[in-house]
Image: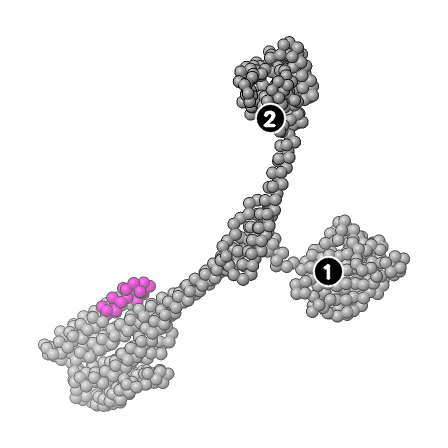
Amino acid sequence: MPAEAGKSVMGGGIFSGVGNGAARIAVTPGCQPSRQGKRLLDSAPGRVPALESVSAARMRRRRWFPGKGNPAWITPRRPHRGTQGDASVCCNNRTQARHVRVIPRAERWPGLPARVRLFGRCAHSSQCRSGTGPTLTFELLKPSLSKMLRFVLPTMSVDRRFGIIASALGLLFLVLASGLLIHQWSAYTRAEYALTHFQVFRATLLAMEKVSAERGPTNSVLGEDVPLPEARAAALRVARAESDARIAQLVGLLGLPGCDRCENERAAAQRVQATLADARANIDRVLRVPRAQRTDPALEQAVMRMVEVIPHFSPITNASTAGVLNGDASALNCMTAARLAATLREQAGLLGSRFTAALVSQRQLTEDEQFAIERTRGGIDQLGAYMRTRVQEDAALAHGAFARVNGKYFGEGLAYVARIRALASLPGGAAASTGEFAARYVPLMRPIVEFRDEALALAEEEVRLHRHAMLVRLVGAAGILSSLMCALALGVWLFRRQVIRPFAEAARVIRAIAAGGPSADLPPNAYRGEIQELFDAVQVLKAKDLERTRLEQERQRLIAELRTMAETDSLTRLLNRRAFESRAQAAFLDRDVLAPYLALVMIDIDHFKRINDTYGHAVGDRALECMADLCRETWRKGDVVARIGGEEFAVLVGVQDRAQVLEMVERLRLRLSRAVVPVEQGAGFTMTASFGVAYAARADAPSVKSLLKRADRLLYRAKLAGRDRVEVEASALADGGPPP
């Protein structure tokens, strides 16, 4: 069996398909595809049909065609991860048993793809029977998170990626922290509003109690004849003033900023004021009538209109209770007990008002009055049962005022009412006035008010404690979240400063070293541990790079010196002949529109051999140096000046016309004739030179050799004509030069 599989011919290499991930299949071609395989390959080229079902996790019966090699029909017989089993593989409709090994998870490194290998040989091929047949191998590669991240962030630096991730985490933390702070702020706001609504609730109960208590002085004066006794009238005025003060306090609370949505409650308070004013006006009309002329319906109507004021407080009580419970549900029990006590106080006052008409008229109770008294008494008993239930749920309410309510009102108060009722049921009525009844009965209701105040105090304490707890939670959450945010920012800053930035700096230095540019400065020894070891290694690398750079610069310097030595005349420091020809050839290829013509000037020092023979070779060298200096001073920077022989010099000049170069040549000739070459003994000597000038147009692409040859002929002509002169081509147009 071959050690490794061959390659399919799909796409010229290993086939890649698309399923749950990429698939790599390697098949040694051993036979031609079947007809079915060809149809599948033609219908879905470049794809592996049902590839995901051929994974190591699920080996189901599937037809799988890896490419234009051997199509295979894999039928696993014991499919299970981490086990070995048999499989039959159909190759070109011929079946041969194969051995399947699924690599267990424990044998794979975490994160490596699942691999399934099929070992065996095809039975119908001589190649397979000889033991060199195809070995089929495929593996399912699942996409990894790192590859996806590399696809999303292909060229982003580590520092920037870390900044983005830290910003995302910080934003997520801010969102969560903002949600928590908003939740805590909402809870604190509800608790604050609960306290405001509780104040409205308490003011409502106090106003109800004062309006209900106002019926006592009212019933007393209804039993008096005109003119009213001053004491009774003063008591009525005081009761009315107290009721008005409590209602005004309630209206003021409903107008506070904390009660922005109290329009219905304010409307209810206005209805209370209007109804109470109408009831008082009706009572005042009754009081202006003598006692003997006051009828029972008028008295009953006066009393009942005062009673009808109390139900108008219910919308305010209900709304304020809902507002309190929205902020603090734990105050429900005490608030319910207080409301039951307020209702009990109202029903107790109503029970006393049922006797007003009979006591004023000194008559027997009617059946309707008896029924009303009995119904009111039943409501009082029911309220008492409710109150006892609430008291049992809260131990703080079980002592103090509630005990006095049981003793005073439910004991003495109801017993007194029962005696008055028994007397009023007799034919002559009860021998008691409304004032006497109120003076005896009203004090017995005082424990109810005390119990209500006690329940309100407990409820207010609960609401305030809850508001304080919400404030502490809000401040604590803000402090903790601020601390966590600062700690997170500090951690990110330290991690970026101690880990990310050092790696970024190290990468920057290494990139600079790899780019061959000037190495960046390394940070000071501010790190510890592995980070410092990394920078130490980078420092060594930088030192080696500096040494390499120094050696490279030295090599370049030597190369430059060698190039200079190869191109420069050592005596005159001008170009030599080879460099001149190279520069001249480059100048010929340059299409300079400002200098369309080239002039080549050949210079030869006259009688140079005589100078050497007369003054020696050292003075001759000095003469050559003098000639080179004059050339450098005369010719332009862009002109090509060279020493091409012993005493011969050549200059290539770009010009617009012949007069331009002739002027420069003549200037050089005159300066040379006036220059004095110093000698060790004597005043020195002067020398002359002959010049030959040849022209060529750039557009004609002249050659260096031809131009040198023409200039040399002109130089020879100048020599023959007597030296110390300039010879120029006679016919510039014929020679390709510029027009004269």
Mark 2 vs mark 1: which is more N-terminal? Answer: 1
Find numbered disc 1 in the image and state the secondary structure of the residue it sits on: strand
Is 211 magenta? The answer is no
Three-letter amino acid code at disc 1?
Glu
Tell me: residue 694, above or below residue 559.
above
Residue plotted at (31% across, 65% down): 259
- On residue 139, the disc is 1
- Is residue 454 or residue 173 the one in the foreground? 173
- On residue 572, the disc is 2
- Is residue 493 or residue 42 the one in the foreground? 493
- On residue 122, the disc is none
Q: Main secondary structure of the magenta part?
A: helix
10 Å crowding of disc 2: few (<14), some (14-19), many (20+): some
Task: Give the number of the mark in front: 2 or 1.
Answer: 2
**Quadrant of the rendered image containing residue 425:** bottom left
For the question of whether residue 576 can be seen, the reply is: yes
